[in-house]
Image: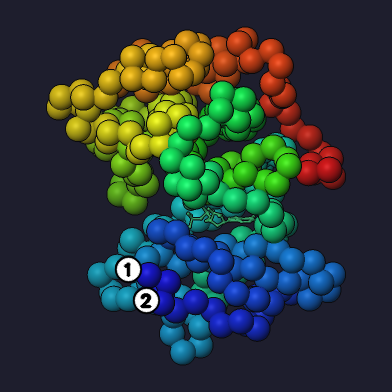
Amino acid sequence: MASDRETLPPGTPVGAYRVIKQIAKGGFSLIYLATDEDSGEEVVIKEYMPNKIARRDHLLRVIPIKFDYTENFYYGKKLFFQEVKALALLRHPNIVRVLSFILAYDTGYLVMPNERGRNLATYLQERKGSLSTTSILEIFIPILDALALLHHHAMVHLDVKPGNIHLRHGQQPLLLDLGAVQPLNRERSRGGQVITAGFSPVEQYFQAGQLGPWTDVYAVGASIRNCMDGRTPIPAPERQKLDLLVPAQQALKGRYPPFLLAAADWAMQMDPAQRPQDAAALLAMLAKHADDSPRSRFSELPSSQQFN
Ligand SMILES: Nc1ncnc2c1ncn2[C@@H]1O[C@H](COP(=O)(O)OP(=O)(O)O)[C@@H](O)[C@H]1O
Ligand SMILES: [Mg+2]
């Protein structure tokens, strides 16, 4: 609950910005709408404030609730800074843009443009899935393109799910929340991994699991499946015991074109080696069939060209 974490009160200054109100919360952060005091422009600020392990003191500083949580708290903060670094490195029309990063109140603040629109997860709840093939392609072709850029830079997102996809009004979708991003080929960090039941593949649950671009591919497959049937897919560890997930090609036969059902099933293979090995591979398969859909190549546009 946000109230447990005590949000910054309206009017609080954060660098050159001023908080208007809290608009969302996640496991590791609180999200505020704010204004740029100089330009008057509205922005969205993401504050590192992990649930259950941190609180705000009387000077508004974010501190661990108790000593035992100190290590976790700082580890999470490191991940938050990792998100900022990853975002600063990646320029892509479908990856949320960073305006500024501020250190204040003993925590970090990521400042982004206020992207008007809605969250895909909320939209799916309202609609109970059943998105059209066109909508699914319009969402996931750009998202896969963004992930292809990440994978190209030897990074993995590790928390792809409808809740981290933002549908901008009349524009292409945005991939949010690079808070779990990890560079590949590095000793796997201890603890603190983000797991979302239904969207995280089995290798994310075990220390020995080999994470890679295929890990994001599974999450995309699960998100596509969620857009079709409106249900959170069966969590991977349950599937591993006894796989009760009926393949999309059977369960949704006739409701979607065979290539889309096949793509979802391919991406959701339990064995990482059986999936498309990276976002580009899944993108190529979808794009081949999506002749009339907007298609993009991952591209590192100068920031001035983005969002225009
Ligand atoms: N730049 C933005 N513009 C508008 N809304 C945003 C923006 N960034 C985040 N949000 C909203 O806040 C929610 C949480 O953001 P996210 O980055 O996923 O944080 P968390 O790590 O806490 O999950 C998103 O689902 C979205 O609805
Ligand atoms: Mg999120």
Residue 148 shows in the view: no
Query: Which residue is nearer to you in this view: 298 or 168?
Result: 168
Number of the label disc, if any, that sits on residue 160? none
Q: What count of labels does the image hold?
A: 2
User: Is the residue at mark 1 in contact range of ligand 1, meaning its CB lies under 8 Å from it?
Assistant: no
Residue drawn at (28%, 76%) of the image: 66
Determine which quarter of the picture holds residue 75. bottom left
Q: Say which quadrant the C terminus sits in.
A: top right
Disc 1 crowd, CA 10 A, few/some/many (<14, 14-19, 20+): some
Q: Say which quadrant the N terminus sits in.
A: bottom left
Disc 1 residue type?
Answer: Lys
Image coords of residue 204 (percent x, y): 32, 36
In the image as oriented, which residue stretches furthest toward the bottom? 58
Query: Which residue is nearer to you in this view: 190 or 91?
Result: 91
Mark pair 2, 1: CA separation: 8 Å
Number of the label disc, if any, that sits on residue 4? 2
Label 2 or label 1, whichever comes before in sequence order: 2
Disc 2 residue type?
Answer: Asp
Residue contact between numbered discs 2 and 1, judged by CB atoms under 8 Å: yes
Residue 157 shows in the view: yes
Image coords of residue 207 (percent x, y): 26, 37
Mark whose residue sits in front, 2 or 1: 2
Say left or right for 201 vs 224.
Answer: left
Dot 1 corresponds to which residue? 52
Say left or right for 123 vs 206.
Answer: right
Q: How is the image coloured?
A: rainbow
* Label 2: which secondary element: helix
Residue drawn at (59%, 46%) of the image: 166
